[in-house]
Amino acid sequence: MFNRRFRGFMKNIILSKCAALGEVTDYFYRVEFQKRGSPHIHMIAWIKNAPKYGENSDDEVIQFIDKYITCQMPNERKDPFLHEIITKVQTHSKSHSKSCKRRDKVCRFNFPKPISRRTFIVDRKFKEVNNNDNNDEDDDELNRMKTKIKEINVYLKEIEDKNIILNWNHFDDSLAKVEWTYDDYERALKILLPIDTVILKRAPEDRWVNNYNEKCIINWNANMDVQFVMNAYACGKYMLSYICKAEKEMSDILRNVHEEAKNKNMSIQQEMKALSGVYFHNREVCVQEAIYRVCSLPLKNASRKVEFVPTDPDCFRFSKPLSLITKMITEGKEDNEGLLYSNFVDKYFDRPDGTLFDICLADFVAQFGFINKNAVRKRTQTWPLKTLNFAVYKRKREIVIRYPRFELYDDEERYYHNLMRLFLPIRKEDDIKEPYSYFFHNGYITSICGEVKSVKLIVLLNRDRYDTKISKQLEAAMHDLSENNIQTDVWGTLCAETELEQEEIAVSIKNKYNKLVDLDNDENPDIEYMLKSKRRTNNLDKNIYEIHSTTFDSTTIRPMLNTMTHEQLNIFYYVRDWCLRKIANENTESIRLFITGGADGLCLLFIDEISLVDRSLWRDLHTRLGQIMYKSGANTFFGNVSIIAVGDFYQLPPVKGVPYIYRITTKEAEFYALANRIRKKRKDQSLSEEDKRMLKRCVDRYNLKLYQDDCLHLFAWNQFVDEHNKKMLPLKCKEIVDVPGEQLTINKRILDQKKKRKLNTYDYKNLKLAVGARVIIEENVSRDDEIVKGAFGNIVEIVFNISKKNFINHIRVKFDNPDCGRQHQNICAICRKEKTICIQRYNNARDDDEYKKNTAQFPIRLGWASTVHKVQGATIKGVVVDLKRFNQPGQGYVSFTRPTNSDELFLTELREEAFFCDEQIEESIIRRR
């Protein structure tokens, strides 16, 4: 569910024309799982035309930040929906928590955030200008600034403690109290905060709100932290440390075992056995992550493909299957090179001639893709390799390449050889001459154009396109992480709310586990307190308990505890602590828990306040108990569980329900009995005179026109449906609009199919609609949003395209079901306000109908009438049934049972032959018994 939801979020919000964060050109994200198992995303996005800090001006960077990032608390009256989201998921707790105060800090997540009238950046130039030579004076000034900032926060907190919402007057009063102007306050922030820190525009009431993007948080509806990357090193170190946190811990353990194995002179087999044992016993994953991995769901994704390019001539190669090698030997085609699969280097040396391919290995892999030589790509030009069974094509987007790195001071010759194989355009291995260091500095090569160029110049120019300044910073970050520990506050600073929740869960579980370890041991793993006697001492009752070990040993209990989920452990510790307090004679309230499962041994069920139990609840209880107890049948009630009902029927009845004491009326009973007889009526059977009289009453009500004009009419064919809808449209609506379908492609087969269109289909090409018209959805547009086939509604507005005259952009519909379009209403403010849905043109590329497949049309039709098939399963209040052409089994029964009683059913005529069932159903059921 999380994976599907996030992919939908990326597709419809981040990467769509919505452009919540701007036009995203590239992205990378990784899924990480918290202690309790909840997944969350770490993502970096590259935005088109985004300013770069240090290259563009600070004003350009600030303008970009203010456009996409905010920390404003929305007005509760103007936008209650967004205000509720920000309050619940994006606001830090004002009381803080134990996790906030770790390492002697008031809040290590830096809440409350500094108030600011504008967005600004703490840059290096300001620090250098304000640096004095006198260190003692600097320290005194810094201490004075910190003291005044603390006094401001204390003053504002006192106001907040009175449940008063802060405003700018409170902030101005706090500045006046410490004898500061706003400029003094901003200067203090620039001096105290680290370089490259972004201070967002933040009102006093927003100082507990975390950074967010408005479009993103409305649609994601969960905590997020959106930040502009100021420092590539810091961003790289953060991503590398937290997306590889579990892997790094596992690597450290394996590294220690490997060192221990070397010291003990273990064999390779013994060392592998030790490593595998450590891995299986120390790598812990939560249930959600295990499901992710077992189902092969992607834990990371990127906009560009990543490939590793082996540059070492002695690198590992994949061997061909033994059967293929045997066949080659039989045919006399064996050779050392033919035994191995080709890699990137082999394809590079076998590339076609021409100036297009006068490129280095890095460019060749990054810019060209590989397919089978016999494969056909209609939209892309391909070039076959000279000897290998592959062809190359130009990629639309260059991929990211990875390659081995060697240190110059470790192996000089290997370093330069690797460099030239990767970034020097060559045709064969011998083009690189030995010694490699001399050839790199003094060698020259001739290009296809005949131009002589320096080897060193070519290699360095090509390398600079791949080894940028950011690449060196990322390499430094990786080296720093491998040598030093992870900075524990980096994630807390960037994503405060998520880290806070994760650590609180981890600490809670750890503390509870430590309690368990302290109170039990291998000899007495579980403790059972038994009351022995009561003695009165100092007028107080004290209980004396005798401790007995249970029949379980540690090998039985510990696996049971280890298999519990965090939720089960919380209940276990809660009950256990309550028992201990109860035994110690502490004043404890009665424990109340709702625990599901284990009801297979149920014999007696108590139900209190019987007058409040609805009749439908009794029915559900009967069904569910039958399922739990595996006992059902005509003479079995409530799964053979005895029920004791306590209460007074003279008290209040169920809220919006039918009391149990009310019996079904005789009229309703007759209607349901007739429906059951129609359900099983065979074609050769006849209805009784009483049944015919009841059906005749339905026909009489129709002739007397006791139904409303817009009452739903049911027909067997779409032809009759269209005729009724066309008749109702001018009667109910005024300004009728023609809505032609948008033809995507057309061919002779489609035209022929159009001519042969059957009577039981409707005209998909030309729709006639109007504001106020009754409509029904014809396609499953969005199952997740409940915009599905058979949903009824009314047209509220027809919106035309501004640029295209008489072209309808979308149609706003208000559906009968209020749950339709909830997700859409989160995006569209107009629909959220008026409880409507914007219906766009729709095209189902998988439709069997060639005409529909190649036509984009609104998936709606007039809904004053419908075929019986579309309303199966629906409950309709008031329906007119035209029994003409009812020639399928079950049609009459389905139409007859749409209303809840006979007064809401109107028949156009009495056709007894329209009601019949499929006789093979009863025979099949009897055989299966």
Image: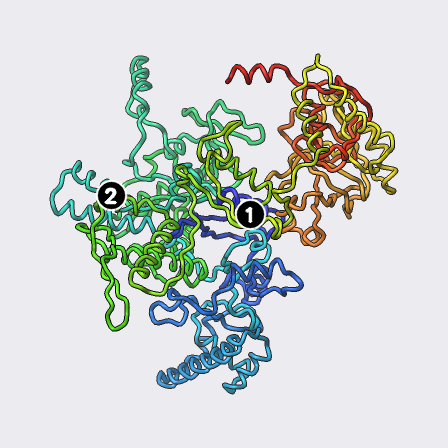
**Percent coordinates x, y for residue 143 in the rendering:** 40, 82
Residue 677: % across, % down: 67, 22
Q: Quadrant of residue 140?
A: bottom left
* Pick the front one: 123 or 610: 610
Residue depicted at 44% across the width and 34% down the height: 629
Q: Residue at x 47, y 27 (%)?
A: 384
Residue 52 position (above or below residue 658): below
Residue at 30% from the left image edge and 24% from the top image edge? 339
Q: In the image, is 745 to the left or to the right of 594?
A: right
Q: Nearer the viewer, residue 527 or 67?
A: 527
Mark 2 sits on what residue? Answer: 556
Residue shown at the point (57%, 46%) measured from the top left: 613
Whether residue 355 is visible here, answered yes or no, is no
In the picture, measured across the screen, residue 871 lies left or right of residue 450, that is: right
* Amino acid bearing label 1: Ile
- Residues at discs 1 and 2 in contact (Cβ within 8 Å): no
Percent coordinates x, y for residue 460 in the rendering: 39, 50
Q: Determine whether the residue tagged by mark 1 lies in a helix, strand or loop.
A: helix
Bin the neighbour count of mark 2 within 10 Å (Cα to Cα): few under 14, some 14-19, many 20 and up.
few
Q: Which mark is residue 89?
A: none
The numbered dot on residue 610 is 1
905 and 33: which one is in front?
A: 905
Q: Is residue 682 left or right of residue 175?
A: right
